[in-house]
Image (spheres, rainbow, N blue to C red):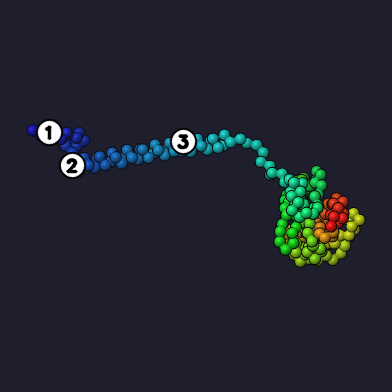
Amino acid sequence: MSKQPPIVAELGRPETPEETAARKAEFSKTYRAGQSFRNLIAALIITLAVVAVVIFGVPRGEPASEPQIDLPGIAADVESTMESPVVIPELGDFWRVNAAELQGGATTVWNITLAPADEDERGFIRIAQAFDADASWAPQLLDGTASTDTTRIGGLDWDVYALGGRTENNVSHAIGTQAGDDYILLYGSRSADSTAKLAESLIPQIRTISEAE
């Protein structure tokens, strides 16, 4: 004798196959929804834990300082490459080196970019030593501006470039002088007095370069 299906209390009779299938489908849907919610909560907890590690676990402090540029070391390599002395500015407490490199091209140039070490000071000065060049080379860096005057600094004659306004490279003042076969150009956004003071500090080296040529 076959077993009769159980009577469902809510219905007062056995379930039909369709009702059984619908009930199981609803149960499965509810179960999956519960699982999804629990998985979401678990994922949220893990995410919060990771954020907490990032916030509280990473050491705090001052931002990492930029690596120091070894100006003497780079200059020594340039002198070896060019077989000629180069200018190496004395930084003291006022200046810091932002860049120092030998640039090739139609004219090979030893470039140094200086900026005040004090954050309250503004501006920059670039020192460019163009090998086997003269004053006719300088306008290439100065939007085509040629020298219109001269001034005397440290016993040497310096070409003065009247830029009028700032160039595309934010240059407002420039002076240059011949050093043997090379041309030394100082240009940037610092004042004429600041540029002249830096130029005067380079005089002994410029004389050495002139005598070595």
- The reply, left or right, for residue 141 in relation to residue 199 is left
Residue 164 shows up from this direction: no
Q: CA distance from mark 1 to mark 2?
A: 15 Å
**Residue picked out by circle 3:** 45
**Are there few (<14), some (14-19), or many (20+) residues within 10 Å of tag 1?**
few
Using the rendered view, name the quadrant where residue 39 is placed.
top left
Using the rendered view, name the quadrant where residue 28 is placed.
top left
**133 relative to 200, above or below:** below
- The reply, left or right, for residue 149 in relation to residue 130 is right
Residue 169 shows up from this direction: yes
> Of 21 and 149, which appears nearest the observer?
149
Quadrant, the C terminus = bottom right
**Residue picked out by circle 2:** 17
Identity of the amino acid at label 2? Pro
Using the rendered view, name the quadrant where residue 150 is placed.
bottom right
**Residue picked out by circle 1:** 3
Identity of the amino acid at label 3? Ile
**177 relative to 18, above or below:** below
